[in-house]
Amino acid sequence: MAKFKPRVFSGVQPTGNLHLGNYLGAITRFVALQDTHDCIYCVVDLHAITVAQKPAELKASIREVTAAFLAAGIDAKKHIVFNQSQVAEHAELAWILNCVARLGWLNRMTQFKEKAGKDRENVSVGLYDYPVLMAADILVYRATHVPVGEDQKQHLELARDIAQKFNLDFSEEIAALGHGDTFFPLPEPLIQGPATRVMSLRDGTKKMSKSDASDYSRINLSDDADTIAQKIRKAKTDPEPLPSEIEGLAKRPEADNLVGIFAALENRSKADVLETFGGRNFSAFKSSLIDLTVEKVTPVGKAMDKLTQDPAHIDAILKQGAERARVLAQETMKAVKDIQGFVR
């Protein structure tokens, strides 16, 4: 197999109102990976339009996600930060990969079934096909690793299937053009830490989401200290004290979620947190969780607010990042067109 330079790619949709789930499930992991990998972090605005968006709100949301990246500590000079729509090669490769992917593969994607619901005939083709665009996002940079949550693992598997089929379908051309025996790497998932999936504060069986009707279901990155404290105090729990062993969380989703949040915020394991708080009641634990969350989250929210007051600065960072990303993406697309047999 060919050797590929280790490279991380990941993206966040600009859907507005970023919350603790976005922060712990994605952004803090992006920050940590900077120390060990070359990273490309993308605001995936083309994915956002698979459902209807108001243009002014979309623009604000793109800047908000970028501000969150920067406020959390992503270094846009050392790594690449940009928005997807500025690099046309994402969409160009997506079309070629649409002609590699198979309908049966897409029909197995469970997220489409969940998002489309019963009104499947009226959703956009983009919502159905966006896993292929996600594959293009990754493969246009020939990325080797992708930090993903549990709910995105199936899409990464699809990207691997598409890459493998392309490599097999064009193996002779790939070798003849000097690319060895493999052109696209098979990207590996990076699933790290104790809170890969942060759940609702009102229902520990549902993912934390901005679309939940209750604002008390989530902690927004824009929430102030008093709001965070109120939401955590009102977070659903059960009548039993916290267990001392991690096995005791198995059938207690709300307890498991709060312990996971604490562990992720303090970069500890759940077992370590339970060693400290096991046997104590929720009121004492919540008090410590409030202090920790306020300490970690409010500085990010304040920094985001300051950054979004200067949209020209954010736009300049995105433009510079897109220029750097485009160099890599164009290199891939030139090779893909040669392999495919296009005249250029």
Image (cartoon, rainbow, N blue to C red):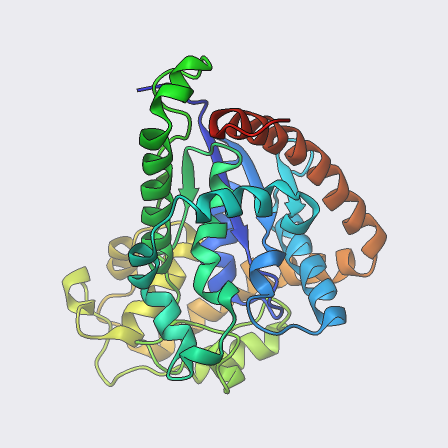
- Residue at the spot x=40%, y=50% of the render? 148
**Can residue 332 be spotted in the picture?**
yes
Name the quadrant containing residue 112.
bottom left
- Residue at the spot x=53%, y=41% of the render? 93
Front residue of 111 and 235: 111
Left or right, residue 236 beside residue 135: left
Quadrant containing the N terminus in the rendered view: top left
Left or right, residue 306 beside residue 62: right
Numbered disc total: 0
Measured from the top left, where is residue 22 in percent x and y? 50, 61
- Residue at the spot x=34%, y=49% of the render? 158
Name the quadrant containing residue 334.
top right
Front residue of 42 and 35: 42
Measured from the top left, where is residue 58 in percent x and y? 69, 66
Quadrant containing the C terminus in the rendered view: top right
Measured from the top left, where is residue 147 in percent x and y? 42, 45
Front residue of 343 and 180: 343
- Residue at the spot x=55%, y=58% of the render? 296
Measured from the top left, where is residue 132 in percent x and y? 45, 51
**Can residue 199 be spotted in the picture?**
no
Name the quadrant containing residue 263.
bottom left
